[in-house]
Image (cartoon, helix red, strand yellow):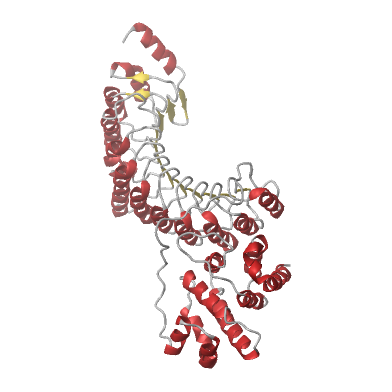
Amino acid sequence: MASDDIALLADALSKTHVGDGELSFKGLGLKLDDAQSVEELVRDIEQFQGLRALRLEGNTVGVEAARAIAKALENKDQLQRCYWSDMFTGRLRSEIPTALRSLGSALMTAGARLTELDLSDNAFGPDGVKGVEQLLKSPSCHSLKELRLNNCGVGIGGGKILAEALIDCHRKSLAHGSPLRLRVFIAGRNRLENEGASALAKAFQLMGSLEEVHMPQNGINHAGVMALASAMRHNPDLRVLNLNDNTFTKRGTIAMAQALRHLRNVQVINFGDCLVRSEGAIALAAVLREGLPVLKEINLSFGEITEAAALVVAQAVRDKPDMEKVDLNGNCLGEEGCDALREAMEKGDMLGSLSDDCNEDGEILKENGTTKKDDSPEKPQSSAEIMSFLSCPSAEKLLQLGETRTNVQQQVHASDPHTAAEILLKISSLYSEEPETKTAVLETIDAVLKKLLSGSDLSSYCFLSTLLVMMGLLKGEGKVKKVPLVPGQLLCLEHAVQQEYFPQHVASLLHTFTSRNSEALQSCSSASERLSSTLKKKCH
């Protein structure tokens, strides 16, 4: 090394930060190629007593330099925190795994017990994960609390390797009586896709200790989101969930909403740019109403959410005592919708900017294929008469059922909102002012709705969103067909709204959509006016 290079290195090393057991070479821009280039850095490490944290980020380390640094770490058994992000700029991708293996091997030799490992912004791909695989499986990581792998190009293959390493670490640490309890996991911009995310979900579910999960921009769609949702449900201490810029759609959002119902400590949710859409937003609104008691921030920006659905979200969060920020920017609200949303949010400073909102007719993309129905519980045996009625409903058949007509409610389940909405609309279409028929229809409607609205807010809202889609009041996904409306269907709803079993907040949701989509009800103007008037009374 030339004398002027040594002088530059010496000057750089003189700026290192030392304190609280931390030795930092952060951001010095050192180009460390071989053992000679790191002589002074190695000396600083060797002479540092009680080393607990080592910062090497913002430099570039070659294979030989890594080996020399590793040698100095072999007796640093108190080392707990390794901040090694952005450490291989300009290096061949093939060099990085070798360098990482050297450093990891040194930590294992020393018997270090890591609590934090940050390898972010190192574009090492799946091979780089292999470079730290043995370290992650070793006793040195049994104590790991925070793992950061942001922007590393991990890919599907790397995600699977990482998941298996975490599972192996948990298994081995559990056998030693102190299971791995990872608290923070960060792996944004890694192209994990569904397979990588699903593999990691298995590890997350096994650990059950996560408090923060950040996995934005990973090309995950509803299948991967559903796997992650299932895993999050088993992490009761979760505080921050950031899945920004993945693709939820209705199925993924509802699965995530179902998981969030079981979590009481979540403070920050970032589902921005995730295509949650209106039906998904309604499902999340239900969870916001009945759970998430300490939530502070929610981001649902750029999700193709319409004005009415956004207002339902706003109504669900405005009474939360700790809520600080609601981001609904970039959705399909229109100018009037933005004004209505600002008015609905009583805490004016809670609502984020709406400067990027698109118009209210923003295109709603559809998922490919048909809508996948949730598995329904086994239905009880029904009489042939009820099944005959449902296959081809008529007022005459309904009257023939007599008192058994209320058993129609056995055929509806909140877990199958499509069938439930379909049955409700079929029955209500039979409404007439003839007293006997009117009584029979309303009694059956009451039995069906009382069952559907007696469960959680989430199941009620999922049923209602499906009903709204079939009534033409909400744009939906898949191939749910709009049903031609007749006045009786609206008059049955008008009756139901007045009953004790029909919650005020459900009436408020219905009123929000009917009042903002009145053109869809023009064919039943008189019945629509009656429903609107009754909803107003119920809501106020």
Residue at x-position 67% and y-position 49%: 338
* Place of residue 376 in the rendered image (x, y in percent of width and height, measured from the top left): 41, 72
* Residue 71 visible in image: yes
509 to 45, vertically: above or below: below
* Place of residue 348 in the rendered image (x, y in percent of width and height, measured from the top left): 70, 48
Q: The C terminus lies in which quarter of the figure?
A: bottom right
Q: The N terminus lies in which quarter of the figure?
A: top left
Residue at x-position 44% and y-position 31%: 21
183 to 408, vertically: above or below: above
106 to 294, vertically: above or below: above
Q: Name the side, left or right, on which 424 lies relative to 506.
A: left
Q: Nearer the viewer, residue 166 or 450?
A: 450
Q: Nearer the viewer, residue 457 or 506?
A: 506
* Place of residue 118 in the rendered image (x, y in percent of width and height, measured from the top left): 40, 36
* Residue 178 visible in image: no
* Place of residue 43 in the rendered image (x, y in percent of width and height, measured from the top left): 34, 20
Q: Quadrant of residue 187?
A: top left
